[in-house]
Image (cartoon, helix red, strand yellow):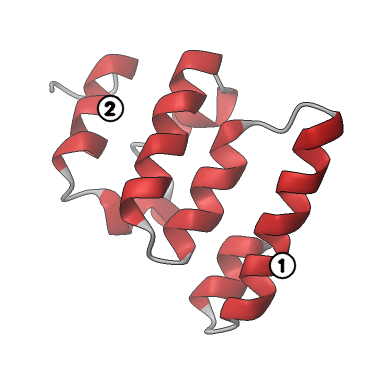
Amino acid sequence: LGWAYAQSGRRDEALQILHELEGRAADSYVPSDYFGVVCMGLGQVDEALAWLDKAYDERALHLAFLAVDPSFDSLRGEPRFNALLGKIGLKQA
């Protein structure tokens, strides 16, 4: 939802979702890729990639779809994203 808000120009709502995730993470587990997706939608590339790297360390299931999920298209030209695909085994780094 946060990614969709960000992509549709509803930045404040996307930031609210990000803050809600942070609040939930204080009490329970929230997968790091959730944060990464919202940051990606907001155009926060460095933050998104940092969260996705953390998600890799957590062995987040959603990362199995990075190579084909169109919501990650904005990161495809990023060397760190391609390196992450290589670590996962989805693409040669």
Query: Could you tell me which residue is drawn at 76 percent across and 26 percent down?
Result: 29
What amino acid type is highlighted by mark number 2?
A: Leu
**Compared with residue 41, is residue 93 higher up or lower down, i.e. above or below?**
above
Hey, which residue is sitting farthest right in the picture? 27
Element at badge 2? helix
What amino acid type is highlighted by mark number 1?
A: Gln
Q: Please tell me which residue lies in front, 69 or 51.
A: 51
| Mark sitting earlier along the chain (2/1) | 1
Q: Residue 71: name its quadrant.
A: bottom left
User: How far from the left and from the top, in percent, is residue 7?
Assistant: 50, 74
| Side of 2 relative to 27 (left or right) | left
User: How far from the left and from the top, in percent, is residue 62?
Assistant: 55, 31
Residue of label 1: 16
Residue of label 2: 85
Q: Please tell me which residue lies in front, 21 or 7.
A: 21
Element at badge 1? helix
Q: Please tell me which residue lies in front, 54 or 83.
A: 54
Q: In which quadrant will I find the N terminus?
A: bottom right
Whether tag 2 and tag 1 are in contact, CB under 8 A, the answer is no
Dot 1: within a 10 Å radius of its alpha carbon, few (fewer than 14), some, or many (20 or more) residues? few
Of circles 2 and 1, the one toward us is 1
**Compared with residue 14, is residue 52 higher up or lower down, i.e. above or below?**
above
**Compared with residue 45, is residue 22 higher up or lower down, i.e. above or below?**
above
User: How far from the left and from the top, in percent, is residue 19?
Assistant: 71, 57
| Side of 56 relative to 4 (left or right) | left
Residue 6 appears in the rendering: yes
- Give the tally of numbered discs: 2
